[in-house]
Image (cartoon, helix red, strand yellow):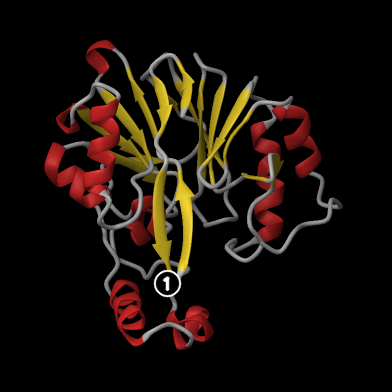
Amino acid sequence: MRLGECAEALELTMSFMGMKSTIHPVVLWEGREGVTLIDAGFPGQLPVIESGLTALGLKLMDVRRIFLTHQDLDHIGSAEALQAATGAEVSAHAADKPYIEGEKRLVKMDPGRWEDRLKAMPEKLRHQARLMMSSPPTVKVKRVLHGGELLPFHGGIDVIATPGHTPGHVCYFVKSQGLLVAGDALRVEKGELAGPSLNATSDMPAAIASLKNLLACPITAVLCYHGGYFDRDPVARIRELADPTVPRGSK
């Protein structure tokens, strides 16, 4: 999915807890800066990420940095494998760092949270899911973010703290493209920009309040990890979604 000049969203299929979905890690590249990957897919997706890079005329070894939006399994899953293969520097917010590095359990990997769904799964899949939850992938975070940074890559990337979905969720605004890489702070559902998923968000009031932090950016397009691309007056829509009185869906 082309996002702009030297900017592409990969479209990767993942399956977790019997649910299939498409996720969208973002690839930025130009000249001597090498490749920046924003989010790193699900565990085991290194080969399909490499295939996606190859289709763009890039090589896996071109990846120099990985910016994580947050700690969820489908965002950090292949970061360790990518780091091992490329030596890429990993960046993430300080509040999510201990979870990403394995010092704390991922906030959404408590087996009790998934017990009903686990019971409904075939035994083999249930066993695999329990193993993944008990020993999720980890990766060393070299660049610790706090929000408010201007990262000196690809024409400048603003780091915007958007806690709520997880304690250390961040969005990245690619200034040269007018592109907001929203992680899970926003999603696209049935062609419309929507707020964070109620079922997957740790602190929904905080997540909604955080959307106001995006309004200072001159956003012309949004790339959501779940749902993809949206460019129909995104600032007006985000302003709407940041209103705590707007009804929320349950998905």
Which is more toward the observer, 168 or 231? 231
Q: Quadrant of residue 100?
A: bottom left
Return the x and y of residue 185 as percentages of the image width and height.
59, 46
Instruction: Name the residue: 52% across, 57% down.
Output: 166
Q: Is residue 185 above or below residue 98?
A: above
Residue on which the image places disc 1: 109
Q: Residue furthest right?
A: 245
Task: Tell me, yes or no, if residue 140 can be seen here.
Answer: no
Position of 78 relative to 18 (above/below): above
Question: Badge 1 local density, few (<14 within 10 Å), some, or many (20+)?
Answer: some
Callout 1, which amino acid? Met
Residue at position x 71%, y 38% from top?
Answer: 212
Residue 75: horizontal and vertical position, in percent?
40, 51
Left or right of 129 on screen, residue 3: right
Asked whether the viewer can see residue 133, the reply is yes
- The image quadrant that residue 85 belongs to is top left
Image position, residue 213 (x, y; %): 65, 36
